[in-house]
Image: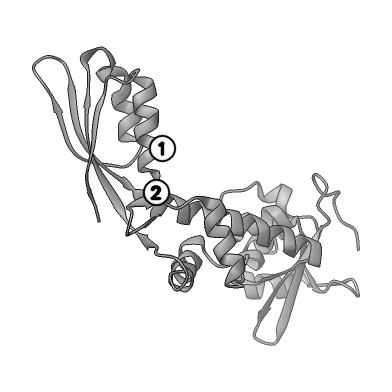
Amino acid sequence: MSSKKTRGEHEPVVARLTVGDKRFEVLVNPELAFEYKQGKEVNLDDMVVSDSIYTDLRKGLRASPDLLKRVFKTDETVKIAAEIVKRGELQLTAQQRRHLIELKKRQIINYIARNAIDPQTKLPIPPARIEAVMEQSRIGVDPFKSVEEQARNIIKAISRIIPIKIARALLRIRIPPEYSGRLYSFIVKQGDVKKSEWLSDGSLLVELEIPAGLQHDVIDRISKMTKGTAEIKIVATV
């Protein structure tokens, strides 16, 4: 059994898929395979480490081209490996699993911080506070489940300890003429523009809906970009 040299410092891991009574295995880069499994675009040639598809990788037993064509409709290693990663399971080392769990944990915390607020104060909740409550609640993170799915469950769990809810903030923003043209493209990238109107003096009036956790960050950035001349009001938080 031979394999290509892996990119970076990551040791290759096994991706495995069982179809009927047949097992198929391939060596892959764990980071790229994880990203691909999550639906991200990766370079498949970099992701696949094995030179072949195996029925038992540890014993070096290769799957025959006939078997591969019968099951996968092709015998091309990279195409089959991509399907194995997408449909099968990744065998990660303890260190790699801890690393992926930590990455997913950061993503979940950032997602909650961006989208949730304290419903009593209407203020965003700092990431450090969210992390502390997660640890207090002993909430585990699955490296292979989506951020959104886990965030919903985590918010439900930590709401027993702190007031928290997913919310959207509606901002009404008036940009002075000297900044309106330059800031328009920035504003529309921040969320959903519910209303946009160019006023007779060249000012821009926008109603912008954004994740509630981002409201103060967006307000601060717009204020800095307009040197404090923009008029910004939080119309509603729902």
Please report the residue visible at 25 percent of the width from the left and 19 percent of the height from the top: 180
Please report the residue visible at 63 percent of the width from the left and 70 percent of the height from the top: 72
Q: Position of residue 203 (x, y in %)?
A: 17, 19
Please report the residue visible at 28 percent of the width from the left and 26 percent of the height from the top: 184
Q: Position of residue 210 (x, y in %)?
A: 32, 45
User: In the image, 158: left or right of 11?
Assistant: left
Q: Is residue 88 above or below residue 50?
A: below
Look at the numbered discs 2 and 1 and tell me whether their residues touch, using CB distance below 8 Å.
Answer: no
Q: In this rendered view, identify the residue nearer to me: 185 or 14.
A: 185
Q: Residue furthest bottom?
A: 21
Q: In this rendered view, identify the residue nearer to me: 5 or 145.
A: 145
* Identity, as a three-letter code, of the amino acid under mark 2: Gly
- Label 2, residues with CA under 10 Å away: few <14, some 14-19, many ≥20: many
Q: Position of residue 122 (x, y in %)?
A: 32, 52
Which quadrant is home to the C terminus?
Answer: bottom left
Q: Position of residue 27 (x, y in %)?
A: 79, 62
Residue pointed to by mark 1: 217
Q: Is residue 120 above or below residue 41?
A: below
Q: Residue furthest left?
A: 200
